[in-house]
Amino acid sequence: MGLTLQWFPGHVGKARREVRILSGQARVIFHLLDARAPISTFYPELTSKKKTIIVFTKTDLADLNLTQKWKLFFEKKGYPVYLSKKNDSLQGLRNENFWGISSFLGKAIVVGLPNVGKSSFINTLVQRKKTKTGKIPGITRGPQWVKLNDKMYLLDTPGIFYPQNIPQEKAWRLAVLGIAPEKIYIEQVLEVGEFLMRYVRENYSVFQDQSENYLDFLKIFGKTQGILSKGGAVHLENAALRLIHDFQRGKWGRMTLDKPVFI
Ligand SMILES: Nc1nc2c(ncn2[C@@H]2O[C@H](COP(=O)(O)OP(=O)(O)OP(=O)(O)O)[C@@H](O)[C@H]2O)c(=O)[nH]1
Ligand SMILES: [Mg+2]
C-alpha cells in the first residue's frame, strides 16, 4: 500500500483559527519553503493578498544549482526570494526596505509547513532564542508574537497547513524531509526508503556502485552500519530509517528532491 499523509494534530485546528485572526494585523508574510523541495512545500493559499516574501530555508543542505533555478522560478512569479542557511545572520532581512513597507509599525507573519525552520528563522532575526525549535515537526503549538525592534514584530506560527490527499511522490518527499512525523509513515518506512534510494541514485553520484535491487542494497547498507536484529540479520526497517536520517543530515551531500523541469 502506498503512503497517504492523513495527519492532523489536535493543536492545529485551534492554532489555525488564531493565526487567521492575528494574520489580519500583519502587513507582510514570510512564506518559508524547504530549499530541498521548494514547490512541494509551497502553499499559495498561505500567501493571500499581502506582500509575500519567500524564504528558502536549509539551503546549506540543498543542491546549489537547483536552488538557483527554483529561486528564479519564484522570482518570475513576482516574489522576492531570500536564501537562508544554517548559521545565516539574515542580515539582508533585518532592513525594513526588504520588507517593502515604509512602516511606522510593521507586523509580519511567518508561515510554512511543519519543521521548515520558522522558529529558527525568527530567533535568528531577533538574535535571541525567543521561540522553541527542534528536530521533529510540530514543536510550535500556537502563534507567538516576537519583537524584532521598536517598530517591527514577527508572528511565529505552528505548521498550520497540513497536506491532505496529496500525490504519492509528494507524500514521500515530505516524509523524507522530516515534515511528516515519523509515526505517520513508520509502517511504510521501507517504501519511503526505496523512494529516497532510487531518487538519489538516479540524480546524484551516490550508491552507483551498489546493487540496484533495493532489498539487497538495504541489507548491505544495514550491515555496514551495524543495524542488526537480535538474530544477527539486518533490521530492514531500521536501515531504511537510517537512510532517511542520513539524508536529513545531508550526509551524502547537498540534494534537492523537487526538479524544476519546466524552466
Ligand atoms: N541545516 C539547517 N537546519 C535548519 C535550518 N533552519 C532550521 N533548521 C533546523 O530545522 C529544524 C526545525 O526548525 P524549527 O525552527 O523548529 O522549525 P519550525 O518550522 O518552527 O517547526 P514547527 O514549529 O515544528 O512547525 C531544527 O532542527 C533546526 O535547527 C537551516 O537553514 N539549515
Ligand atoms: Mg516552530
Image (cartoon, rainbow, N blue to C red):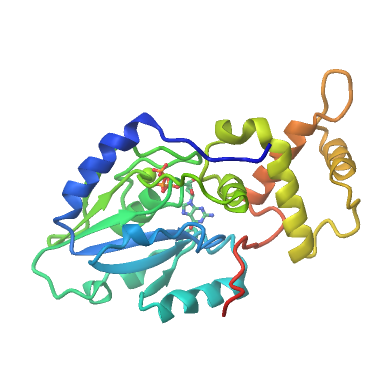
Residue 54 is situated, as x and y percent measured from the top left of the image, at 38, 67
Horizontal side of residue 150 vs 12, given as left or right: left
Give the camera-side residue of 169 and 209: 169
Horizontal side of residue 53 vs 199, given as left or right: left
Residue 156 is situated, as x and y percent measured from the top left of the image, at 29, 48
Q: Is the residue 14 above or below the residue 81 in the image?
A: above
Q: Name the residue rendered at 67%, 35% in the picture.
A: 188
Residue 251 is situated, as x and y percent measured from the top left of the image, at 69, 53
Horizontal side of residue 202 vs 139, given as left or right: right
Q: Name the residue rendered at 80%, 65% in the picture.
A: 205
Residue 102 is situated, as x and y percent measured from the top left of the image, at 14, 75
Give the camera-side residue of 171 and 131: 171
Which residue ends up furthest to the left in the rendered image? 104
Q: Is the residue 205 above or below the residue 133 in the image?
A: below
**Quadrant in the picture for the C terminus:** bottom right
Q: Is the residue 4 above or below the residue 93 in the image?
A: above
Which residue ends up furthest to the top in the rendered image? 230
**Quadrant in the picture for the N terminus:** top right
Give the camera-side residue of 133 and 180: 180
